[in-house]
Image: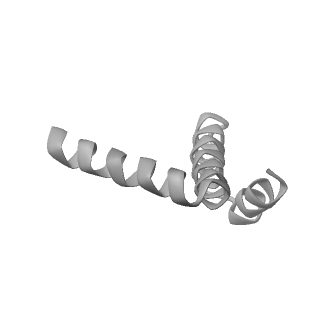
Amino acid sequence: MSEIVNEFWQKYLNQLHLYPLRTKAITAGILVRCSEVIAQKISRIKKLQLRRLLLMIIIN
């Protein structure tokens, strides 16, 4: 498992070095998506609100 994580991390750092803006934008989008899904689960929303999720990704 550790090898997979290390390999992924090295690929991420390589992409960050080659394409910093694109890599940071994708990373931010993933983090916003994760936080919004968690927020909706905490709010006990039964069905994931995709419109709300997409708006959060576009705004951030």
> Residue 32: x, y in percent?
66, 47
Numbered disc total: 0
Residue 26 position by quadrant: bottom right
Q: Is residue 6 left or right of residue 33?
A: left
Relative to 32, is 22 above or below?
below
Q: How is the image coloured?
A: one colour
Q: Residue at x 26, y 43 (%)?
A: 5
Name the residue nearer the viewer: 48 or 21: 21
Q: Residue at x 25, y 50 (%)?
A: 7
Q: Residue at x 16, y 44 (%)?
A: 3
Instruction: Kindly give the residue lying farthest to the top in the view shown.
Output: 42
> Residue 45: x, y in percent?
65, 47
Name the residue nearer the viewer: 50 or 3: 3
> Residue 50: x, y in percent?
68, 64
Q: Residue at x 35, y 45 (%)?
A: 9
Q: Is residue 9 left or right of residue 57?
A: left
Residue 30 in view (yes/no): yes
Residue 1 in view (yes/no): no
Instruction: Kindly give the residue lying farthest to the front in the view shown.
Output: 18
Name the residue nearer the viewer: 4 or 21: 21
Q: Is residue 2 left or right of residue 25?
A: left
The N terminus is located in which quarter? top left
